[in-house]
């Protein structure tokens, strides 16, 4: 019961983002170190959330007024993805609004070859990290392989299986930018201000959709209008994001451990759940309870380092034996702090219960 409550509370936390890349539909400004950068509809801005500054770039060459309206960074699945809002030549190849292409001019999804009608614009694209399928959205009702899709649908495509529905939306509107995260989460933007029940999304906002039970809820993930008011009239029309590492939750593997006083030492492990990315330091310390530091155990504190990917680490405390008949005594080992974006879980304290071996005639015969 406690475990499921902890997990569901964790599931409500919006994804922490490290970097976000996006494009607008008209000229706009963003803060840089010591000034501003001016972007246009072709520009992709790289925004670093830790320092709140942007860097703009445009690597498709002269597009004769065409707007980059869909974008995804190259990743382990393949090359970067781009789409335009009107026909333009890129590296000598004519790109139509429903084509998705790599920056060097080769088509990834060829609209004519796949039977997409003239007049349809692909206005958002991403890749599904689980399948590497291209995921996209269209700007009008569109028939693909006999199925009609809406402007707020997300459509998956690969060379072998063709088109399929990736995600249906429960709101009325047009998705014009998308980035698929893990575990059913995604980021998107809308083409015009849209009521999402939990909030009203402006067209420059990036919204996170988080699955929750049979449904989902929406939170504002990022809004460039918080940094420059030129975005109040600019539509964010393409998005890609890098989430922060999932450092995980750190807790004892058990709430208590029982040991005989003549055991010499006691070892308990800290476990790492809900993520294992990055190196994290756990600061721990012993706290006396009915057991006495220096008489029943050697009090200690220390740093336990979890390497990137490590999910368990032991803490060992020395026990001191005596020949007194004193009954069961206890002390605590506490997780004090966790470095970086690591989270302290439950249990934070492990209770060490020392059984007095003087109660046991046979055990006693081995002492002293
Ligand atoms: Ca654009
Ligand atoms: Ca397009
Ligand atoms: Ca759309
Ligand atoms: Ca938008």
Image (cartoon, rainbow, N blue to C red):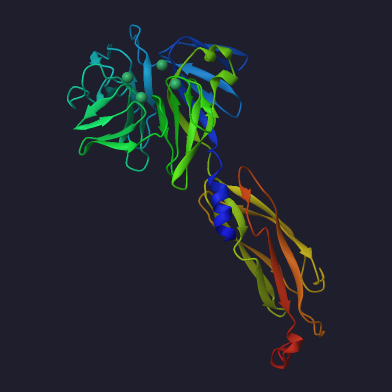
User: In the depicted view, which residue is nearer to us: 291 or 2?
Assistant: 2
User: In the depicted view, which residue is nearer to us: 214 or 57?
Assistant: 214
- Residue 368 showing in the rendered view: no
What x and y, as percent, mark residue 170? 41, 34
Residue at x-position 58% and y-position 21%: 53
**Looking at the image, is 1 positioned above or below residue 83?**
below
Quadrant holding ligand 1?
A: top left
What x and y, as percent, mark residue 342? 61, 47
Residue at x-position 76% and y-position 87%: 358
Residue at x-position 55% and y-position 44%: 12
Classify residue 251 by image quadrant: bottom right
**Looking at the image, is 303 positioned above or below residue 94?**
below
Farthest-out residue, top? 64
User: In the depicted view, which residue is nearer to us: 229 or 273?
Assistant: 229
The N terminus, quarter of image: bottom right
Classify residue 94 by image quadrant: top left
What x and y, as percent, mark residue 157? 27, 34
**Looking at the image, is 366 positioned above or below residue 276?**
below
* Image-based side of 31 in relation to 301, left or right: left
Q: How many marks?
A: 0
User: In the depicted view, which residue is nearer to us: 63 or 12?
Assistant: 12
What x and y, as percent, mark residue 199? 54, 29
- Residue 244 showing in the rendered view: yes
The C terminus, quarter of image: bottom right
């Amino acid at each position: 019961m406690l475990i499921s409550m902890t997990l569901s509370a964790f599931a409500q936390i919006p994804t922490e983002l490290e970097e976000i890349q996006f494009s607008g539909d008209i000229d706009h400004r963003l803060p840089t170190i010591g000034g501003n950068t001016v972007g246009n509809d072709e520009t992709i801005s790289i925004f670093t959330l830790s320092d709140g500054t942007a860097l703009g770039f445009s690597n498709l060459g002269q597009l004769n007024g065409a707007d980059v309206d869909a974008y995804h960074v190259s990743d382990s699945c393949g090359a970067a993805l781009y789409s335009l809002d009107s026909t333009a030549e890129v590296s000598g190849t004519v790109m139509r609004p429903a084509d998705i292409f790599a920056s060097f001019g080769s088509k990834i999804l060829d609209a004519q070859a796949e039977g997409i009608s003239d007049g349809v614009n692909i206005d958002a694209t991403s890749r599904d990290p689980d399948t590497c399928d291209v995921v996209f959205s269209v700007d009008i009702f569109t028939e693909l392989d006999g199925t009609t899709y809406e402007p707020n649908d997300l459509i998956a495509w690969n060379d072998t299986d063709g088109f399929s529905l990736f995600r249906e939306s429960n709101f009325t509107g047009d998705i014009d930018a998308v980035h698929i995260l893990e575990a059913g989460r995604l980021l998107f933007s809308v083409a015009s201000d849209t009521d999402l029940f939990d909030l009203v999304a402006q067209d420059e906002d990036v919204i996170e959709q988080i699955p929750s039970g049979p449904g989902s809820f929406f939170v504002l993930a990022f809004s460039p209008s918080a940094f420059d008011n030129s975005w109040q009239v600019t539509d964010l029309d393409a998005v890609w994001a890098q989430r922060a590492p999932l450092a995980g939750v750190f807790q004892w593997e058990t709430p208590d451990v029982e040991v005989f006083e003549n055991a010499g030492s006691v070892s308990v492990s800290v476990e790492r759940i809900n993520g294992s990315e990055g190196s994290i330091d756990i600061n721990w310390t012993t706290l006396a309870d009915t057991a006495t530091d220096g008489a029943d155990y050697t009090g200690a504190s220390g740093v336990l380092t979890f390497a990137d990917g490590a999910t368990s680490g032991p803490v060992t405390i020395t026990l001191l034996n005596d020949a007194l008949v004193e009954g069961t005594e206890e002390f605590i080992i506490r997780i004090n702090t966790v470095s970086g974006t690591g989270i302290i879980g439950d249990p934070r304290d492990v209770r060490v219960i020392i059984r007095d071996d003087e109660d046991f005639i046979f055990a006693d015969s081995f002492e002293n």
